[in-house]
Image: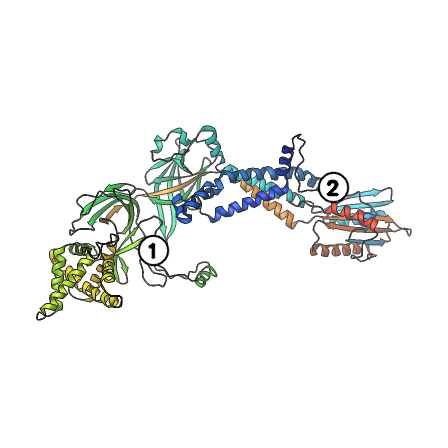
């Protein structure tokens, strides 16, 4: 058998066609395609696929993001060039199998019974015996022994040489392994093409189907953006709120989305979540009803993670879950001005509502409700094990990284304290200029360092982590006193009165000058902290109050060597004056004076920190969640994958092929028998294999010994004798090469 890596030779008269056919059908071309396919698969695995384009811009920058999008690296497996590689790989490997497969099958059927004695003597693995029995009895004995050893054989009388040749073979099925492995590549690639978006691309090219990139009701989308129920393959998503149903799936494309009509509708009765004792989710499941469009039949089913439900060739997977439009009742607190008057504020997740003009500081902003979570299981410790509701972690060392990833699969180097910290609402406040900031407010206070805090997160970009404002809860577990304190700080008369009270209780009445000086300093610090001092916050629009204004004032007004001392003094004045601001606020709201104890002092200190952070919030309103009516929604992945069974078949062929190639060894065995002058027979034995290994060397010794024991004779020469004359060596080398030749594929 002769197997080459060169391509097929076309009989076309055109040189270009002959060269193209030779290139495509060559093994070198197929191997090159496999290498390119492997590199592309690595890129598709390392680079996150099908993310929103702004995420790639943030990661790689505008220049490289555009280049990567131009070569479709964000959707490698559905890129045109990836599918083109698969098509050419199928053609190339198919031509290779068509060219070399018949030769392998012919070689597998060939008994190689036209060998001569001289060729057998040139084999490296041989042995020669002389027995007293005649040739016929010896042939019968060797045939029985060959059958016992698992060889199939043919016996050929050599009339010209007065000899008998027994040619046996074992493990010839290994050549089917090479064919099976190559066919497996073809079958798997065909299955991949069937399940790719190639059929969808063909429909887009042939029937002018185009993606839609605008918001519209699904029922109003024209047929140009829809695929029919008979579409052979697709993979899309469907979002179904509780109590509602959908009959379409959304297929994401680079330039928009295509609507896939389904042969049935999916009605979500209930979305189910089960939790572990730690509060972590254990089960996501959806109780659905599949409504057949043709028959009207209603088929109830449950879909769980990794447990899909298949109907009419379409598999329904539980992909994720979202809010389905929960109803929220909230209280809107003003975050600017000297008033703490609240306004009821209701909303629906997925909807929006304008901020009431009654809110002080409102300039026509709109609130867009994006998400609601009834349960939030968070790790409220930082990387050092200290309580931190924001989940701030310590810097990880290289040793920590290795220690976390080695050893037990469930261990972690980070201490965890998982707690359910209650419901939260996520929304955006969008200004009239179109700019928006995103907020995440928790409904219930969280214990942070022994003090209950309301957490209010803020971020400018979706790629940024939330930065949390910690508002201390009062004795009634509300934010009312902090909001009143904020409003009191915004009032100039309250700041002046608080500075006066602070000076009176801090300096004896006898020292009027020092008392007046302290009152002026306290008033100045309160004005700086409130963002009302033009020399502090007013000169920089980015610094409009809080500790930032005080730091800027110190940096401009105090020499470098005395800034640390001045900062400590101003902070003590601020804490003392803020105590009086709180007392005035309580009086204005009909509450008694607070006792000067550790708990109230901690409340004032936490309030000062929260007030300083609130100047960075950027929202005119704080929305506090009061009550809700949760509505869940399931996100299903809908797939029709006819190529799945084809890929399973290809995988089976690949397993059979690899097993045959690596665990089945082809061996050939010959016996050349001649009569001796003494009336007995001489037996020349030879063996060959496709792969000469140590196991074959042991098998040859074992086989030669077994044959000698059956014949009752010892070999006339050792197995490692040198080859005979050069004339025989040439013929033997050519024959042994033919007998052991295998495909390089």
Can residue 472 be seen here? no
Determine whether, in the image, residue 579 is placed left or right of residue 691. Answer: left
Find the residue positioned furthest to the left: 510
Asked whether 528 or 35 is in front, the reply is 528
SS class, disc 1 = strand
Q: Position of residue 267 (x, y in %)?
A: 36, 37
* Colouring convention used in this rendered image of the protein: rainbow
| Residue on which the image places disc 1 | 378
SS class, disc 2 = loop
Q: Position of residue 110 (x, y in %)?
A: 74, 41
Residue 295 figure quarter:
top left
In the picture, the disc for residue 110 is: 2
User: Mark 2 or 1, which is nearer the eye?
Assistant: 1
In the picture, the disc for residue 535 is: none
Determine whether, in the image, residue 738 is placed left or right of residue 270. Answer: right
Q: Quadrant of the C terminus?
A: top right
Q: Is residue 25 above or below residue 376?
A: above
């Amino acid at each position: 058998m002769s197997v080459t890596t060169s391509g097929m030779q076309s009989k076309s008269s055109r040189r270009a066609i002959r060269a193209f056919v030779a290139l495509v059908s060559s093994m070198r071309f197929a191997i090159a395609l496999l290498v390119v396919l492997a590199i592309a698969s690595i890129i598709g695995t390392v680079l996150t696929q099908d993310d929103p384009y702004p995420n790639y811009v943030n990661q790689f920058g505008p220049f490289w993001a555009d280049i990567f999008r131009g070569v479709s690296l964000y959707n490698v497996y559905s890129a045109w060039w990836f599918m083109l590689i698969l098509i050419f790989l199928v053609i190339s490997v198919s031509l290779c199998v068509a060219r070399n497969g018949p030769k392998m099958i012919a070689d597998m059927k060939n008994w190689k019974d036209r060998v001569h004695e001289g060729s057998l003597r040139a084999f490296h693995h041989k042995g020669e015996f002389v027995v007293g029995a005649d040739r016929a009895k010896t042939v019968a004995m060797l045939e029985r022994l060959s059958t016992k050893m698992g060889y199939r054989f043919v016996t050929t009388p050599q009339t010209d040489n007065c000899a008998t040749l027994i040619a046996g073979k074992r493990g010839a099925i290994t050549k089917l392994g090479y064919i099976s492995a190559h066919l497996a590549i073809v079958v798997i690639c065909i299955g991949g093409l069937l399940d790719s978006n190639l059929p969808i691309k063909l429909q887009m090219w042939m029937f002018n189907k185009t993606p839609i990139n605008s918001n519209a009701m699904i029922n109003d989308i024209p047929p140009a953006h829809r695929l029919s129920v008979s579409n052979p393959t697709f993979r899309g998503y469907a979002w179904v709120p509780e109590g509602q149903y959908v009959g379409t799936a959304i297929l994401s494309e680079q330039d928009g989305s295509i609507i896939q009509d389904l042969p049935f509708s999916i009605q979500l009765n209930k979305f189910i979540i089960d939790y572990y004792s730690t509060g972590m989710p254990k089960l996501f499941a959806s109780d659905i009803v599949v409504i057949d469009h043709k028959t009207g039949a209603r088929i109830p089913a449950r879909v769980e993670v990794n447990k899909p439900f298949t109907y009419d060739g379409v598999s329904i997977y539980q992909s994720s879950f979202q809010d389905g439009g929960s109803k929220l009742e909230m209280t809107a607190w003003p975050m600017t001005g000297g008033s703490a008057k609240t306004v009821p504020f209701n909303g629906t997740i997925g909807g929006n509502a304008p901020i009431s003009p009654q809110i002080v500081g409102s300039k026509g902003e709109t609130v867009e409700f994006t998400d609601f979570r009834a349960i939030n299981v968070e790790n409220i410790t930082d990387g050092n094990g200290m309580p931190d509701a924001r989940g701030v972690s310590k810097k990880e060392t290289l040793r920590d990284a290795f220690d976390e990833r080695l050893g037990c699969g469930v261990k972690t180097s980070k201490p965890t304290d998982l707690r359910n910290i209650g419901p939260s609402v996520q929304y955006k406040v969008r200004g009239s200029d179109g700019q928006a900031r995103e907020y995440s407010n928790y409904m219930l206070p969280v214990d942070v360092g022994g003090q209950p805090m309301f957490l209010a997160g803020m971020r400018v970009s979706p790629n940024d982590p939330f930065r949390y404002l910690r508002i201390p809860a009062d004795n009634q577990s509300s934010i009312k006193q902090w909001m009143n304190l904020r409003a009191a700080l915004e009032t100039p008369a309250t700041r002046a009165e608080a500075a006066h009270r602070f000076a009176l209780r801090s300096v004896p009445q006898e020292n009027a000058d020092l008392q007046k000086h302290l009152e002026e300093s306290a008033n100045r610090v309160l004005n700086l902290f409130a963002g009302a001092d033009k020399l502090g916050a007013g000169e920089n629009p980015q610094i409009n109050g809080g500790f930032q204004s005080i730091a800027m004032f110190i940096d401009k007004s105090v020499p470098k060597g005395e800034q640390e001392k001045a900062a400590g003094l101003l902070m003590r004045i601020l804490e003392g004056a803020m105590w009086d601001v709180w007392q005035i606020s309580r009086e204005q709201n009909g509450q008694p004076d607070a006792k000067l104890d550790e708990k109230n002092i901690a409340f004032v200190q936490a309030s000062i920190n929260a007030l300083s952070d609130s100047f960075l919030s950027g929202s005119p309103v704080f929305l506090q969640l009061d009550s809700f009516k949760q509505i869940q929604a399931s996100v299903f992945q809908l797939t029709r994958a006819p190529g799945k069974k084809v890929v399973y078949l290809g995988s089976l062929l690949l397993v059979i092929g690899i097993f045959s190639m690596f665990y089945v060894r082809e061996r050939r065995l010959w016996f050349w028998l001649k009569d001796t002058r003494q009336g007995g027979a001489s037996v020349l034995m030879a063996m060959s294999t496709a792969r000469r290994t140590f196991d074959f060397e042991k098998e040859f010794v074992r086989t030669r010994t077994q044959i000698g024991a059956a014949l009752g004779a010892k070999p006339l020469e050792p197995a490692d004798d040198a080859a005979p004359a050069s004339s025989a060596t040439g013929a033997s080398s050519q024959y042994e090469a033919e007998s052991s030749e295998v495909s390089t594929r």
